[in-house]
Amino acid sequence: MNRRLACIAILSCLLTMPARAAAADLPIRVILVGDSTMATRSGYGDALCALFKPGTRCINLARGGRSSGSFRAEGRWDEVQALLKDGASFRATYVLVQFGHNDQPGKPGRSTDLVTGFPSNMARYASEATQWGGVPVLLTPLTRRSFRGPNLKDDLAPWADATRKVARALKVPLLDLNALSAAAVQQMGEQEADTLAMEPPREAAAPLPAGASAEPQGTPKSTFDRTHVGPKGASLFAAMVAGELARLIPALAPSLK
C-alpha cells in the first residue's frame, strides 16, 4: 500500500512539473500607484522602472496632485483592478502604493483625515490588491527637502507613521522611503539637496529700475521647488527604492539591474 502511495506521489509530481516550470518562466510585473513625487517627469517612478531588467513589466500609474482619496475617486484605481484581474500572464504583480503629500490639510478635494480617512484608504488599497492577486507594498511618502536652519523639516512624518501602522496591522511589506530619503537629504544639507530639484533655484537678481517689469514677457516661471525631483533626484531615489525592494522582497532582486 505504501509503495502504491509513493508511486502516486511521484506521478503527481511529474505531472505538475511542466506547469511549475512554465509558471517560473513567466515575467514579473510592477505597478506604481502614487502622486507627483512618483509620477512621470516630476517624480522617481520612471527612473525606477528603468532599473528593472528587460522582460519585467513596470507600469507607472502615479499622477500629480492625487491623494489616497482622489486617486480612487477619479477611477484610477479601477485601472489597477483591471490589470490585476487579467494577471495570468505574470508570475507575480507587485503594487507599490505611496501617498501622503496631497492628503495633507488645505487641499480641497484631495486632503483626507489623518486619523481615519488616510489609514483607511491605505488599508483598502493593500487589501484589494491582495484580493485581486497582487502583492501590495506600502511606501511612506518621499520627503520634502525644506530646511529650517541646518535641520530638515519633516512635515510628512505623521503620514509616514500612519502608513507604517497600516503595514504592520495588515502584515504587508513596508518600504520606509520617508525615513530613508529624509536621512539622505539631511546628510547632504540644503545646498546639495537643492540640486535634486526639477530646476535649480534662481540666483537673486539685481534691483530693478522703478517701473520695470519683474518678469519679462515670454519668460517661463521657475519650476524649482523642494518637493518634486529632476533627473538627479529621480535617479537617487529610484536607486534607493530599488535597493529596498531587493532587500524586502528577495524574489524581486533577480529582476533588478
Image (cartoon, helix red, strand yellow):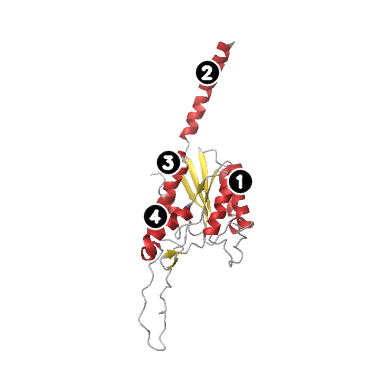
Q: Amino acid at mark 2?
A: Ile
222 and 239: which is toward the camera? 239
Q: Amino acid at mark 1?
A: Ser
Q: Amino acid at mark 3?
A: Ala
One can see residue 90 in this view: no
Question: Residue at position x 52%, y 22% from top?
Answer: 13
Image position, residue 79 (x, y; %): 57, 50
Q: What is the distance, in whole Å, between disc 4 and disc 2 at their CAs?
A: 50 Å
Q: What is the distance, in whole Å, between disc 1 and disc 3 at their CAs?
A: 24 Å
Element type at mark 3 = helix
Residues at badges 1 and 2 in contact (C-beta under 8 Å)? no
Which of the two labelled residues, at mark 4 and mark 2, occupies the earlier sequence position?
Answer: 2
Question: Which residue carries the number 4 mark?
Answer: 236
Left or right: where 167 falls relative to 26: right
Crowdedness near tag 3: few (<14), some (14–19) or many (≥20) residues, C-alpha within 10 Å: some
Question: Which residue carries the number 1 mark?
Answer: 127
Q: What is the distance, in whole Å, between disc 1 and disc 2 at their CAs?
A: 37 Å
Question: Which residue carries the number 2 mark?
Answer: 10
Which of the two labelled residues, at mark 3 and mark 2, occupies the earlier sequence position?
Answer: 2
Question: Residue at position x 49%, y 46% from top?
Answer: 30
Which of the two labelled residues, at mark 1 and mark 3, occupies the earlier sequence position?
Answer: 1
Q: What is the distance, in whole Å, between disc 1 and disc 4 at their CAs?
A: 30 Å
Image position, residue 101 (x, y; %): 53, 61
Foreground tag (1 vs 2): 1
Question: Residue at position x 44%, y 56% from top?
Answer: 181
Question: Which residue carries the number 3 mark?
Answer: 253
167 up-or-down from 225: above or below: above
Question: Residue at position x 41%, y 60% from top?
Answer: 186
Location of residue 222 by image quarter: bottom left
